[in-house]
Image (cartoon, rainbow, N blue to C red):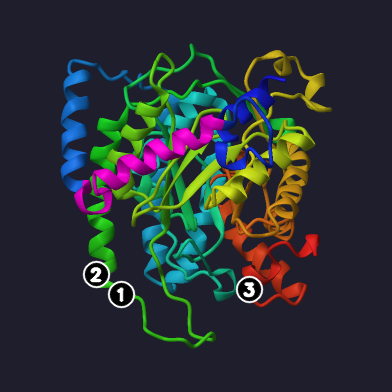
Amino acid sequence: MGSRKLVRDIFLSKQTKKVVESRFSSILANRVFVIRRFCAQNELPNKVEQGTKAVTENLSERVNGASKESEASVKKGRLLTGATIGLLIAGGAYASIVDEGTFCGWLFSATKVVNPFFAFLDAERAHRLAIKAAALGLVPKEKRLDPSILGLEVWGRKFSNPIGLAAGFDKNAEAIEGLLGLGFGFLEVGSVTPMPQGGNPKPRIFRLPQEGAIINRCGFNSEGITSVAKRLGAQHGKRKLYESANPPPASDDEDEQPVKVPGVLGINLAKNKTTEDAAGDFVQGVYTLSPYADYLVLYARDQMQWGEEGPPPLLVKIAPDLSKQDLEDIAAVALTLRLDGLIISNTTILRPDPVSSYPVAEELGGLSGKPLFSPSTNILKEMYILTRGKIPLIGCGGVSSGEDAYKKIRAGASLVQIYTAFAYGGPALIPQMKAELAKCLERDGFKSVREAVGADCR
């Protein structure tokens, strides 16, 4: 009942009153209207630089004096970092006698040696170490081009492959370059709140390695818009320089050779826990961070989003614990309001078997990982049918292989996100998934990802 109310709080609008009768009908339309009117009146596409500076200065005054949480170093973390550096240095001699592609493959395979040691660390400490390693460039960099069969275009953005890293891993945009360099087709950072907030008390991340799952109740811990905007601004500058130096070839040849393209960047927005003005929180997020994003996301349990080249794509992320009526309501509103996309799905509060048999299942929080694959894929397929394939969908939940990604695509996903599988499998999982996905497409006679989207719904 709670999930249903939260969804309707966000989705139902006056424009869809004839389709969905509910007392929550005006809320979504009002929120979308506020953001769109704000962007239009302030000429967001033409004044993003001035607006970003003004909001950043305002937020800087509000958070002046806020201290950053110190990171306690541990011996295990140092050993892991040292082992990673050692592998990179030791590979130097090997690199001098092999081609770049072979050496790149060796580096990714070498991470399989280091990754298991992360299991000996506290889950959140292991996460922080992984972010730091990526931020410092202590992770492999994918030099090989993706198979051309994996390339596609969504919202006018070119994706070299449809596999992305979901929000929650790089919450504060600390390691964008390192993570995209691993070979993801896109990366979603956040969730980002206007003001810094610490989230829920620790421990708040719990592993279920036997089931390839994680339970978390982080509570949207975030360094806030000011810190994130600074990092995104620096990254945005590098990206523009790269695009200027590497313009896409002007060709209509479908058989042209694949080219390296910078990964697509999404930003996930959230409101502060104690805010009394949720709409204002999202307006701040849109106004400050949209210049740096290819798309923006809001959770259905919160509100809405924006992107980069105005007006940017509007996506909403929904939970898997929804009734058929909820899904029909969401699809009707999404079509009427012409949303640019849906992400399906978020974590679940349910504890399906065999997860329910573990003591850690008693912990509060959202469950992610393999147990979520079937229910989230069923919801994905249902939403593809309800939206008649007119809205791009991102499949998220329990994806741990190229075959899983392929099933999401056949169920209606244009793009696929991973999180928990990456936390367990590490960098070596990415090239493995892309190779498996390409084989799946070729096996069934598809010439592109686009051809396979929704194949099980036809």
Q: Main secondary structure of the magenta part?
A: helix
Q: Secondary structure at mark 3?
A: loop
Res. 244 mark = 2
235 and 102: which one is in front? 235
Circle 3 Cα neighbour tier, 10 Å, few/some/many (<14 / 14–19 / ≥20): some
Residue 130 in view of the camera = no
* Amino acid bearing label 2: Ser
Return the disc, 1 or 3, that comes first in the chain's sequence: 1
181 and 305: which one is in front? 305
Residue depicted at 22% across the width and 26% down the height: 59
Res. 448 mark = 3
Give the quarter of the figure containing the C terminus. Answer: bottom right
Residue depicted at 70% across the width and 70% down the height: 441
Report x, y in % for residue 96: 37, 69
Task: Specify start and end residues of the magenta stretch as a single range.
Answer: 26-48
Q: Secondary structure at mark 2?
A: helix
Total marks placed: 3
